[in-house]
Image: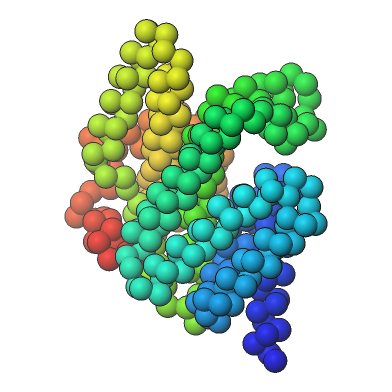
């Protein structure tokens, strides 16, 4: 009886966190991962049938009781259900933490891109859906935001999903002891570093983006622009990790630097890129390579 009560409680939690992430501005990116965590706990702690039951029941409630049910259901299945299943499988198989996250990001973003392409090809007005999301903003600001969202929807969606997956794994690792879930924790953020080969993706993307702009090829230019935004986001995160490495014991100054980077991201991006050549965190002092291999 207690197990059934716990299962129902986690199912309700998953729905509440998912719905709350939609209606609470800006905080949604922090709230949404807890919807995935509720399903992951169901899958790992109470078995696959309990987890699938949670996904099915939450899906029915979302579809029946919310406006634009089919749209929200698609978001739930992609952002919560799929993410939860992949992470749970990786954790149960004791796969390397980085590999679990990479596979979840790869598969989820692949389905996202296919879905967005299908929406565009079907003639559905994606602009109309985005307008409803930003309807409360002032007119000038909403027009600017709408242009950015429409033009870079693939990059923005990819960054959002990747962030959601990372936060889901991080938050789950923080509560893993409470639910007795054996999980390989990620290395400290200050140890995180992109592979050096990433710079070649940046160079080639910038090159082809420039050629597309010069030749006035709209679709290729949008594709490479979206790719560049994703790469810049990764280097932005690397810039933050470098800052934490040097200011780990000076919390106030670190917060100031983070605020500066958030309001002017190019600084953090530049710091992340030049780290390739300057190697701010020396190899002798950093165990990043070992962390990448072990994932804990």
Identify the residue at the far front of this view: 122
Q: How is the image coloured?
A: rainbow
Identify the residue at the far top of this view: 215
Q: Residue at position x 23%, y 48% from top?
A: 282
Quadrant of the rendered structure where residue 101 is?
A: bottom left
In this view of the protein, can residue 149 be seen by the observer? Answer: no
Q: Residue at position x 51%, y 34% from top?
A: 117
Residue 199 percent location from the top left of the image: 27, 33
Q: Is residue 58 above or below residue 75?
A: below
Residue 42 percent location from the top left of the image: 57, 75
Q: Is residue 3 above or below residue 51?
A: below
Where, quadrant-wise, is the N terminus in this rendering? bottom right
In this view of the protein, can residue 4 be seen by the observer? Answer: yes
Quadrant of the rendered structure where residue 214 is?
A: top left
Q: Is residue 115 left or right of residue 270?
A: right
Residue 219 percent location from the top left of the image: 45, 20
Q: Is residue 139 left or right of residue 170?
A: right
Q: Nearer the viewer, residue 13 or 280?
A: 13
Identify the residue at the far left of this view: 284
Q: Residue at position x 32%, y 19% from top?
A: 208
Residue 2 percent location from the top left of the image: 68, 90
Q: Residue at position x 23%, y 35% from top?
A: 277
């Amino acid at each position: 009886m207690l197990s059934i009560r716990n299962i129902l409680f986690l199912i309700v939690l998953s729905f509440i966190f998912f719905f709350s992430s939609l209606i609470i501005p800006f905080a949604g990116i922090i709230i949404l991962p807890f919807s995935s965590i509720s399903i992951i706990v169901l899958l790992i702690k109470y078995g696959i049938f309990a987890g699938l039951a949670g996904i099915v029941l939450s899906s029915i409630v979302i579809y029946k009781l919310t406006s634009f049910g089919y749209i929200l259901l698609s978001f739930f299945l992609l952002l919560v259900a799929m993410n939860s299943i992949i992470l749970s499988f990786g954790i149960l198989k004791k796969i390397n933490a980085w590999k679990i996250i990479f596979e979840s990001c790869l598969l989820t973003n692949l389905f996202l891109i296919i879905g967005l392409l299908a929406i565009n090809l079907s003639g559905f007005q994606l602009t109309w859906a985005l307008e409803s999301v930003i309807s409360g903003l002032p007119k000038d600001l909403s027009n600017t935001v709408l242009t950015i969202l429409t033009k870079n929807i693939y990059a923005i969606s990819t960054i959002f999903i990747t962030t959601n997956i990372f936060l889901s794994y991080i938050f789950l690792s923080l509560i893993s002891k409470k639910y007795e879930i054996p999980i390989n924790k990620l290395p400290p953020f200050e140890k995180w570093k992109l592979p050096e080969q990433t710079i070649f993706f940046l160079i080639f993307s910038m090159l082809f983006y420039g050629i597309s702009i010069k030749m006035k090829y709209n679709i290729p230019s949008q594709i490479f622009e979206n790719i560049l935004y994703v790469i810049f986001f990764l280097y932005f995160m690397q810039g933050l990790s470098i800052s934490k490495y040097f200011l780990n014991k000076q919390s106030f100054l670190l917060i100031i630097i983070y605020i500066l980077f958030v309001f002017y991201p190019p600084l953090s991006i530049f710091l992340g890129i030049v780290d390739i050549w300057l190697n701010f965190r020396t190899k002798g002092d950093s165990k990043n390579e070992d962390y990448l291999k072990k994932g804990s």
